[in-house]
Image (cartoon, rainbow, N blue to C red):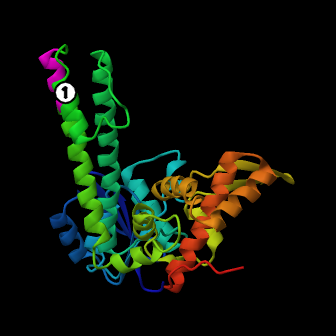
C-alpha cells in the first residue's frame, strides 16, 4: 500500500520486539518494549502514519490485537504455520523476527488469520474453560471410584455419583478408615463442584442475548445439542467467511492433507491444521446424531459399505453434520426434514 509504514511485532509473554519499515525496506525504528497496555499505548502514539501492523498468532495476540485495533490504521494477525520463513531461518532473534514480519507486510505476503469480534473471543474463552472443568470433574469421579476400590468397598457404578446413593453408601462404610472416608468425600464434593460450575457456565452462554437465537436455530437440527451448537457458533463466529462446505470441513479438521510429488499422490491422515476444539465436538456429536438424524445415519451407512471402516464412516457423518450446520447458520432458517 502506497505511503504506508509497515510495523512487525514479535510478541512474547513479557516483551515485544518491533520494527518499523518504509515501503522500500528502509528501517525507520526498531527496538523492544514491555508487553503492557501502557507501553503499547505510548508506542502507538509515536508510530508514523498511516501504518499497517502485523504480528504472529500466539496465546497473547488476542488482547494485543483488540487493544491496538482502534489505535492504528490497520492491524493483522498472521497464521503461525504459514509464517515458516521465521522458523527455518539460520539466525533467529526477536529483532530479526520483527523485521521479517514487517517485510511480509511490505511485500503483501502476510498470511492473515481470521480474528472474530472481541465479545465473541471472550465468550469463546469461557466455553473453552468449560473443557477444563469437565476434565477435572471426570478426574474427581475417577478418584472417588479408585479410593472406594482401594478400600474394598462395593458400590453401584451407575449410581455412585448420585447424592442420595453416595450418602447412603458412606453411612454403611463402617470398615473404612476415617481418613480414607474423608478423601472419598472430598473427591465426590470436588466432582459436584466442577459439575455445577460447568452447568452454570453453559446456561449463561446459552441465554446470552448475542447467542441465544442462533444457538436455538442450530439446535433444530436433529442430533445437535447445546454444546455442539455453542461450540460451532463461538469457534466459527461468522459462517460466511467459508465460501463452500469443503472449506468449513477443512477448518474443522475433517479432511486429510494431499501430498503429490513426481506424479505420485499420497493420502495422509486427518490434517493437524484444524480447529481442534471444533473437531473433537463434531466427531463426538456425529456418533450420537445418527440415532436421531436419518441424513447422518444414511451418510454413515453409505461410507461403511464403501470403506468398511467405522472410524472413516464416523468422519463422513461429521462432514454431513457440518453441511447441515452451515446451511442453517448461513440461511438463518430452522432445519426441517423434507418428506421423500
Magenta-colored span: 177-185
Location of the C terminus by quadrant is bottom right
> 208 and 176: which one is in front?
176
Q: Is residue 292 magenta?
A: no
> 135 and 14: which one is in front?
135
**Is residue 114 in view?**
yes
Task: Write down the quadrant of residue 204 in the picture.
Answer: bottom left
> Which is the main secondary structure of the residues drawn in magenta?
helix
Residue 281 shown left or right of residue 244 in the figure: left
- The residue drawn where x is 53% and y is 45% is 90
**Is residue 248 in view?**
no
x and y percentages locating residue 124 in the rendered image: 34, 64
x and y percentages locating residue 219 in the rendered image: 45, 71
Q: How many marks?
A: 1
> 205 and 236: which one is in front?
205
x and y percentages locating residue 32 in the rendered image: 27, 57
Task: Write down the quadrant of residue 68 in the picture.
Answer: bottom left
Task: Write down the quadrant of residue 315 in the picture.
Answer: bottom right
Q: Is residue 229 above or below residue 213?
A: above
**Label 1 crowd bin: few (<14), some (14–19), many (20+), radius 10 Å:** some
> 71 and 258: which one is in front?
258
- The residue drawn where x is 32% and y is 28% is 145
Residue at the far right in the pictured view: 263
Instruction: Give the structural element (helix, strand or loop) at label 1.
Output: helix
Residue 257 shown left or right of residue 130 in the figure: right
x and y percentages locating residue 118 in the rendered image: 30, 73
Residue linked to disc 1: 170
Residue 16 shown left or right of residue 36 in the figure: right
Amino acid at each position: 500500500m502506497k505511503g504506508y509504514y509497515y510495523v512487525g511485532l514479535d510478541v512474547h509473554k513479557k516483551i515485544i520486539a518491533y520494527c518499523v519499515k518504509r515501503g522500500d525496506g528502509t528501517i525507520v525504528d526498531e527496538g523492544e518494549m514491555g508487553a503492557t497496555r501502557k507501553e503499547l499505548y505510548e508506542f502507538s502514539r509515536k508510530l508514523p502514519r498511516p501504518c499497517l501492523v502485523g504480528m504472529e498468532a500466539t496465546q497473547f495476540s488476542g488482547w494485543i490485537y483488540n487493544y491496538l485495533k482502534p489505535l492504528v490504521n490497520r492491524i493483522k494477525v498472521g497464521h503461525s504455520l504459514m509464517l515458516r520463513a521465521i522458523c527455518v531461518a539460520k539466525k533467529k532473534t526477536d529483532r530479526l523476527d520483527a523485521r521479517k514480519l514487517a517485510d511480509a507486510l511490505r511485500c503483501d505476503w502476510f498470511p492473515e488469520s481470521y480474528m472474530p469480534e472481541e465479545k465473541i473471543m471472550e465468550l469463546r474463552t469461557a466455553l473453552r474453560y468449560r473443557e477444563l472443568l469437565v476434565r477435572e470433574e471426570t478426574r474427581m469421579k475417577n478418584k472417588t471410584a479408585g479410593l472406594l476400590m482401594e478400600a474394598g468397598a462395593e458400590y453401584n457404578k451407575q449410581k455412585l455419583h448420585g447424592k442420595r446413593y453416595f450418602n447412603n453408601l458412606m453411612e454403611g462404610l463402617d470398615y473404612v478408615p476415617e481418613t480414607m472416608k474423608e478423601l472419598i468425600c472430598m473427591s465426590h464434593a470436588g466432582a459436584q463442584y466442577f459439575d455445577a460450575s460447568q452447568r452454570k457456565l453453559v446456561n449463561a452462554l446459552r441465554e446470552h442475548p448475542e447467542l441465544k437465537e442462533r444457538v436455538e436455530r442450530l439446535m433444530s437440527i436433529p442430533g445437535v445439542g447445546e454444546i455442539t451448537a455453542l461450540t460451532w457458533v463461538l469457534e466459527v463466529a461468522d459462517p460466511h467467511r467459508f465460501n463452500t462446505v469443503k472449506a468449513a470441513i477443512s477448518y474443522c479438521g475433517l479432511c486429510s492433507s494431499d501430498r503429490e510429488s513426481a506424479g505420485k499422490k499420497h493420502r495422509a491422515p486427518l490434517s493437524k491444521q484444524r480447529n481442534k476444539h471444533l473437531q473433537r465436538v463434531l466427531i463426538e456429536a456425529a456418533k450420537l446424531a445418527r440415532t436421531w438424524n436419518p441424513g447422518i445415519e444414511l451418510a454413515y451407512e453409505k461410507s461403511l459399505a464403501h470403506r468398511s471402516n467405522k472410524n472413516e464412516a464416523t468422519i463422513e457423518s461429521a462432514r454431513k453434520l457440518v453441511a447441515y450446520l452451515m446451511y442453517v447458520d448461513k440461511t438463518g432458517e430452522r432445519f426441517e426434514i423434507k418428506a421423500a
